[in-house]
Image (spheres, helix red, strand yellow):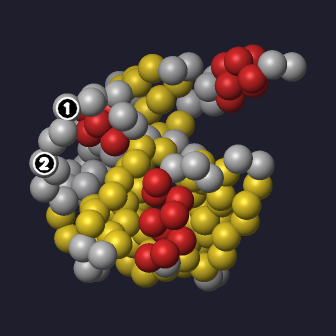
């Protein structure tokens, strides 16, 4: 099978949208990701997948920490910016939670220490040990399906 068929098929799985952030030497970095999942309740672990060639990959390796912001349905533009779909430079006012940069207005923010890593194919899987969670009581998620953003009604 070719790469296009594989990618198209994987896009048929509807997901939420997250922004992964980390800080290294005073510089905040962020990237949009839909490869996120819970792993364990005891201990509390989550997983993110980052392309090996992504700048974020090296930054998380060096910092040993990352945060995940679960985006709300009104944050599509934020997702597009961190996915590189909006090219003009913007000053993002990150919110600090648990000493880490996160996206203000997200449905939830999760801060993590890197617990373990696994290099699999062209991605690195980061298992994060959850430090803390900030949960917004109301709101709907930004979702992604078949290469497009959707709102859950």
Furthest residue in direction right, as rendered: 1
Residue 47 placement, left or right of 141: right
Classify mark 2: residues with Cα within 10 Å, few (<14), some (14-19) or many (20+): few
Residue 114 found in image quarter: bottom right
- Nearer-the-camera pick, 152 or 10: 10
Residue at numbered disc 1: 88
Task: Find residue 79 and report its horizontal and vertical position in percent.
Answer: 33, 38
Q: Residue at x 18, y 39 (%)?
A: 89
Residue 95: % across, % down: 18, 64
Identify residue for label 2.
91
Judged left or right of residue 63, residue 94 is left
Residue 28 visible in the current orientation: yes
Mark 1 secondary-structure assignment = loop
Image-based side of 125 in relation to 55, left or right: right
**Along the viewing direction, whichever of 93 and 148 lies nearer the viewer:** 93
Classify the position of the C terminus by image quarter: top left
In space, the residues marked 1 and 2 are separated at their CA atoms by 10 Å
Report x, y in % for residue 100. Answer: 29, 73
Task: Give the residue displayed 67% in from the left and 70% down from the top.
Answer: 117
> Dot 2 lies on which element?
loop
Identity of the residue drawn at 38% across and 77% down: 132
């Amino acid at each position: 099978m070719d790469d296009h068929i594989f990618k198209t098929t994987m896009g048929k799985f509807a997901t939420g949208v997250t922004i992964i952030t980390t800080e290294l030497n005073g510089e905040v970095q962020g990237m949009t990701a839909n490869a996120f999942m819970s792993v364990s309740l005891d201990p509390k672990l989550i997983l993110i997948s980052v392309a090996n060639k992504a700048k974020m990959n090296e930054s998380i390796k060096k910092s040993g920490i990352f945060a995940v912001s679960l985006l709300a349905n009104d944050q599509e533009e934020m997702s597009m910016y961190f996915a590189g779909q909006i090219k003009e430079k913007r000053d993002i006012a990150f919110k600090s939670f648990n000493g880490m940069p996160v996206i203000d207005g997200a449905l939830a923010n999760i801060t993590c220490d890197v617990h373990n890593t696994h290099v699999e194919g062209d991605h690195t899987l980061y298992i994060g040990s959850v430090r803390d969670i900030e949960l917004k009581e109301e709101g709907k998620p930004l979702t992604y399906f078949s290469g497009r953003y959707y709102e859950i009604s």
